[in-house]
Image (tube, rainbow, N blue to C red):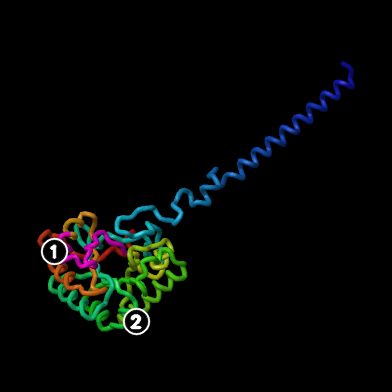
């Protein structure tokens, strides 16, 4: 083979090597483009590395949507609370939809007779209309909970600005009526929590509050049925839901009296839901 041919072969080999190098570099760039720090796929980064689309953990059990979260400024977690500050086998009594001029005083009387404190989840305009009742609740040692302005059970499908207004306007109404006492919890109507509503509540000093046992008193099934439901479902957890608003609550008053008597016989003390414990 003459020198000219050998030079041509050498040149061809160099071109082939150059092409191969370019292809290898392009392949490496393509892999890097599909991966984030530590080789995590870009798709996983965009989706929150495996979290569900709404930021929740997918858990439920009380109708409350929105799952667990983090801790906001002030040390208030935005995860939905169920446990009792008193720990052990303590039970949390929660009362929704008031205050009501007919039924809230009767509920207060039952609680006082049993020496029990409760958490009252109030609707903003109701609190504004009955500031005397809000003050009675506070004076008796009970705690306040924000239950929004309009009790809209579809809040989880509404814009964030709407949710924020419903929560914060109600908080102001309740605190104005209370004459200085703070609202310590937020309960979404019908459990319609969202990651945003939980964050808004916690950032404003209110722990999102769920429930474990729905007494079904709102539907007025009869005093005995309400009591039976509580006894049957208390194994689900310590927070029980009753109502002092939304209609005739005579069955609730009677059932609450019987439930508190039964809880005492069972050696079950009462307390308040956790506020700062995750």
Q: Which mark is residue 176?
A: 2
Q: Which mark is residue 25?
A: none
Residue 176 on image: x %, y %: 34, 81
Q: CA distance from mark 2 to mark 1?
A: 38 Å
Residue 247 in sight from this viewpoint: yes
Q: What is the magenta range? A: 209-228
Q: Quadrant of the N terminus?
A: top right
The residue lying at 54 percent from left, 44 percent from top is 41
Residue 198 on image: x %, y %: 39, 64
The residue lying at 44 percent from left, 66 percent from top is 158
- Above or below — where is 78 with respect to 57? below
Q: Quadrant of the C terminus?
A: bottom left
Q: Residues within 10 Å of mark 2 (few under 14, many from 20)?
A: some
Residue 150 belongs to magenta span: no
Total marks placed: 2
Q: Is residue 75 left or right of residue 40?
A: left
Of all residues shown, which one is farthest toward the top? 1
Q: Quadrant of residue 269?
A: bottom left
Q: Quadrant of residue 225?
A: bottom left
Residue 134 on image: x %, y %: 27, 79
Residue 72 in sight from this viewpoint: no
Secondary element at image label 1:
helix
Q: Is residue 10 left or right of residue 162?
A: right
Q: Nearer the viewer, mark 2 or mark 1?
A: 1
Q: Which mark is residue 224?
A: 1
The residue lying at 16 percent from left, 66 percent from top is 222
Secondary element at image label 2:
helix
């Amino acid at each position: 083979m003459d020198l000219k041919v050998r030079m041509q072969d050498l040149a061809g080999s160099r071109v082939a090597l150059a092409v191969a190098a370019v292809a290898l570099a392009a392949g490496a760039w393509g892999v890097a483009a599909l991966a984030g720090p530590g080789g995590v796929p870009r798709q996983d980064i965009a989706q929150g590395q495996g979290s569900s689309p709404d930021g929740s953990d997918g858990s439920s059990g009380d109708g409350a949507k929105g799952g667990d979260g983090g801790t906001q400024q002030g040390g208030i977690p935005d995860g939905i609370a169920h446990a009792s500050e008193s720990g052990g086998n303590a039970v949390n009594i929660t009362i929704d939809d008031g205050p009501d001029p007919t039924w809230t005083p009767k509920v207060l009387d039952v609680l006082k007779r049993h020496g029990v404190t409760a958490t009252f989840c109030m609707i903003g305009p109701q609190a504004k209309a009955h500031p005397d009742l809000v003050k009675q609740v506070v004076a008796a040692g009970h705690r306040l909970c924000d239950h929004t302005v309009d009790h809209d059970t579809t809040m989880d499908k509404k814009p964030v600005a709407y949710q924020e207004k419903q929560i914060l306007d109600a908080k102001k109404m309740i605190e104005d009526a209370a004459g200085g006492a703070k609202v310590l919890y937020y309960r979404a109507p019908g459990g319609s929590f969202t990651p945003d509503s939980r964050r808004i509540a916690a950032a404003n000093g209110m722990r999102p509050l769920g429930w474990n046992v729905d007494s079904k008193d709102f539907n007025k099934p009869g005093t005995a049925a309400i009591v039976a439901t509580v006894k049957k479902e208390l194994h689900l957890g310590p927070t029980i839901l009753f109502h002092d608003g939304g209609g005739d609550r005579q069955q609730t008053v009677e059932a609450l009296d019987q439930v508190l008597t039964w809880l005492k016989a069972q050696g079950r003390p009462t307390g308040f839901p956790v506020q700062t414990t995750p």
